[in-house]
Image: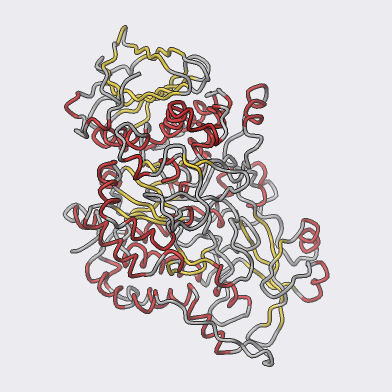
Amino acid sequence: MRGHGLFCSLAASLSGCLPIVLLLSLMCCACTAAQRHKPMPVPSPNLPRPDPGHIQWLERQSMLGNAQELSQQVSGTDLLWRNSASLRRLPLLQSAAPHWLDVNPHALTDGQSVLRTLASPDFLTFLKEAGYQGIFFAPTGETDAVWSARPVAVDNDVEGENVVSLRLAPNLGNDKDFNSLVNALEAAHVQLGGDLPPAATGLGPDFMLQARKASRFDGVYAMLSIPREDWDVLPVTAGEWACLPLGDSAVKTLRQRGVLPERLRRDALYWGAPAGWAVTGEVRGVDGQTRRWAYRYVGSSQRPVLLWQDPSAQARRIWSAAIIRHTGLQRQTLAGFRLEGLMGLDTLPADGADKPAALAAAPLPEALATMSGEVHRYGGWSLQDDILPPSLTRTVLDAGVDFTRDNSTCALAAQALLSGDATPLAAALRASVADNVDHSRLARGVRCGSSTVWRPLPGQSAGREQGRFRQKTSNFDLDRGASVASLAARALGLDSAHVAEHQAAMCSTCLLLLGWRIGLPGLTFLSPQDLVGALDSAAAPNVRVPLWEESPLSVGRAASMAFGSLAAQWAQEDSFARQIARLLHVRHATGLAQGRLVRIVTGPPGCLAVWSALPQGGYWGLFANFSPKPQRMTCPLPDDASPHALAVADGHVFAVKNHSLTLPMGAREAQHVLIGVPPSRFPVVGEGFRPKRK
């Protein structure tokens, strides 16, 4: 069977892979399901109801319309019985593809050439030499930009989120380019992953068809019609689709009148993305009736939420079709779920304030379990890819997903750097161990490689350290976040004009932050922004970086880069990207991705060490000094550990006395140490990966 990456090279181990029959049958509908929409027909302004031809055209562009074509290839056939929905093969992916390059195509300067760059021989060689076994390419869906005259904007955390179609966004390329990328990655044994359509989409054809009361589209979104006598409390809009959020006063009035449901569980969340009720303008339906609709949104009023629990199961059909296309037709190994918008779409009980936070997750666990089962049935793995608080980690993992994105450790490490206090980070790690969280199932790295986001952090301790943290972050948008290099520059007191003069300090500080993705069990996700040292700008927060090398044909404004492009760094023996590569190669050889976090040790102020047991024996130790001054940290070894200690970065042998290890730590520095792992297990990666020891 010809499949992508693991589907090909490990076919013997993957008895649950997608059968060739399914691939062939899905390919039969590829042209139909993935065709570009033709020009929009112009409806007549004199008709008493929407032009039927225009409605039919909208149906052909909708996600639900494509869902029928895709699902018919599987429904009623024996293909549903070829694999088990409960199939769990975590060790296979953890050992074969522990390191992923997290590529947000909307945050690159490559434009339509990004697919060709990813498939180029030079870039594929870089991936292999640098220790990356997978590319997580997201978001890629067509957005509502073609359906709206409003400027395209970043509504929440990631540009390109307003997905309205199962098709590839036109500004990224076409299906031929994407298929060429899939084939090139398959030949290079590199995995491909990406996100499915999110629960909070853009304003596209499915939304418009439901608002026009088109047959078959009731129940796709969480929306309801507002009686005409209650329009007096609604804001005036400029047109049908000039949607606006409802203010608190209007929501309260509509609840009192029995139009809107009582307070939802979502409304009690303190950490979630902004959410609430919004309304459309006056929309003429296919039945000639004019209506105004209220609907739930997340992020902004331009992002309506799909309704998972509707008995029509229309939203579920869309996701089922997306999984068939993503895992089956496109042969993507890892499927990302963006379902935070579903959280809390249920009324809040009278005593809801006293209930556990996990209650607010409904119907998220049900959706995660169902969608993960479908991904498993077609031979893939699932990833919960939203920014959720650590209190929900066990809830998400128990729902049956393979991996969940760990954003909180990244954010807590950034907080420790800016405040010099590692106490909250240590407390969160200890709490996760006490809660029996399987750290090998965490995907380390901020979503889509965009920036560290603070809102899901647990409550901070008050006092001087909290005040220092707020002072350090006063110029950051705490919802938008900040890049790794920008956090490092802020901690060092540098502006972008002086970063080049302090390369060594910037490198050490960035390695400290990224060490919390590399030095712990689980999958590691690093972005081009992380590797080039992209620097945020308050004046231009959405600047981009080149994927491989700088080009005069770049699209959009390029960010300042602390370390230079990947192509330039790969030509330098001791570059930042090569130091990262050294860590990744040793991480892969020792199997840290499948490891088990066993001990957290605090030292002098700002110092923290974490021990992880390795699957083949021995331990990986991550030592971190977040303080602005050099310190020495003494840490006891795990009880059964061998007294043989090696530095991961350069193979230096450490002295172990009294079953303890004492390390001199530079200011804002991380060190990785192996205990009980002989040098023979180290990969041979060349002298270019071994920086000179200070």
Residue in view at x 48 percent, y 27 percent: 502
- Quadrant position of the C terminus in the picture: top left
- Specify the farthest residue to the top: 658
279 or 167, which is in the foreground? 167
170 or 312, which is in the foreground? 170
Which image quadrant is residue 507 in? Answer: top left
The picture places residue 297, in percent across and down from the top left corner, at 63, 60
Horizontally, residue 251 falls left or right of residue 520, namely right
The picture places residue 574, in percent across and down from the top left corner, at 32, 31
Residue in view at x 71 percent, y 75 percent: 239
Question: How many numbered badges does the structure rendering display?
Answer: 0
The picture places residue 677, in percent across and down from the top left corner, at 23, 24
Which image quadrant is residue 27 in? Answer: bottom left
Horizontally, residue 151 falls left or right of residue 425, namely right
Location of residue 50 with respect to 675 vertically, above or below: below
- Specify the farthest residue to the right: 232
- Specify the farthest residue to the front: 552
- Quadrant position of the N terminus in the picture: bottom left
Location of residue 604 with respect to 477 vertically, above or below: above
Which image quadrant is residue 688 in? Answer: top left
Residue in view at x 55 percent, y 77 percent: 217
Residue in view at x 34 percent, y 56 percent: 117
